[in-house]
Amino acid sequence: MKRILPVDELARDTRFQRINIEEVVFDPRNAVRDDRSQRNAFKPTDPEAPDASRQLMHGIFVGEIQALEGAGRTCWDFDTGDGRDEAPFQLKLDMARQCWDESRHVEISVKLTEHMGTEIGEFAEQTMLYEAACNPDPVLRLTGVNRALEGLAIDVFNTMRDFGKATGDPVLEFCEDWMLADEVTHVKMGSDWLRRLTADDPDRRKAALDFQRAVDHLFSFGGLRGDDEENPIHLAKKFRRLAGFTDDEITELVDVAAQAFAEAQARSAAAASS
Ligand SMILES: [Fe+2]
Ligand SMILES: [Fe+2]
C-alpha cells in the first residue's frame, strides 16, 4: 500500500461529486448578504434553516469520512520514531483511537442525513480536510486537521446541537452532543502533540501554527464563523479551552474570523458593483 495517497485516489462511488473549496469561497452566490438580519440561516425562524442545516450536515458527513481517512493515513504514512518525518508510536495509537471515533461518526452522520431527509451525494464534497491530512510533517497534519478543522467541528457541532434543541429535534441534539464530546478529545490530541513535539523546535512550532492559521482563515469563509449574532457558527469557547486552546489563541481565532468576514464583504461589494 502506497504512502501519502493523493486526494484523487480516494475511494468514492458514483454518488459523490467533488468540488474545490475555492469554488465555494469565491462563488458570489455565497457572498455575504447586505441584509444582515437575514444572514444567520441557523435561526429556526429563518426560511432557509432546513436546507442550510441539511447542507451543513452533509458537509459534516463527508468531513467525517475524510477525518477517518486522514487519521488512518497518519498511522501508515510515517515510520515510527521521534524524527521530523516520523511519528511516535503513542501518536499512532491516538490516531488509531481517532479512526475508531470517526468510523462511528460516519455511521451517525449517514443516519442523521437520512433523518433530515437528505441522500448521500445530494451536496458536493470538498476535500480540504483530507488534503490538510496529506502534509508531510505529522505535526502540521495535527495542527491543520485536529486543531483547525476539528476545532471548527467543535463550533459546528455545538451550533447544530443548539439548533436541534431549538427546533425540538432530540435525535439531532443528542447525536451532535456525543460527536462534540469526541471532537474535544481529537482537538486536545492536536494541542498536546503540537506542544510535545515542538517543545525544543520553535521553527517547527511556528510552521505548524502558520499552517493552522491558513486553514482557519480559509474555513472562516463568508462570515460563516464569528462572534456576532449574525454569524451562523459561533466559537464554542468553553469547549475550545477544554481542547487545549489558550485564551490568546481563542482571541486570535476571533480576529482571523473577523478578517475573513471583512474580506468576504469586500468581495460581495465588488461583485455587486460590477
Ligand atoms: Fe468526527
Ligand atoms: Fe474528529
Image: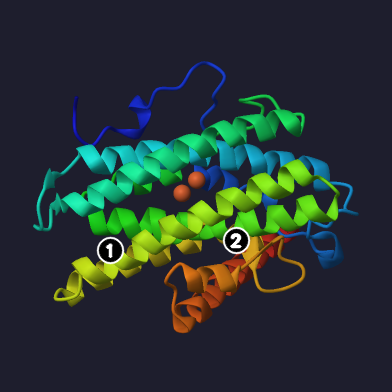
Can residue 126 be spotted in the picture? no
Provide the secondary structure element on which disc 1 rests. helix
**Side of 186 where 6 appears, left or right:** left
**Side of 148 where 271 appears, left or right:** right
Residue under circle 1?
A: 193
Q: Is disc 2 surrounded by few (<14), some (14 to 19) or many (20+) residues within 10 Å?
A: many
Q: Is residue 89 above or below residue 121?
A: below
Q: Earlier in the sequence, mark 1 or mark 2?
A: 2
Q: Nearer the viewer, residue 107 or 79?
A: 107
Can residue 207 be spotted in the picture? yes
Tell me which residue sits at (24%, 53%) in the image. 91
The image position of residue 211, as x and y in percent, is 34, 62
Residue under circle 2?
A: 155
**On residue 136, which mark appears?**
none
Mark nearer the viewer, 1 or 2: 1
Q: How many angstroms separate mark 1 from mark 2 (CA)?
A: 21 Å
- Splitting the image into 4 quarters, where does residue 246 fall? bottom left
Amino acid residing under circle 1: Trp
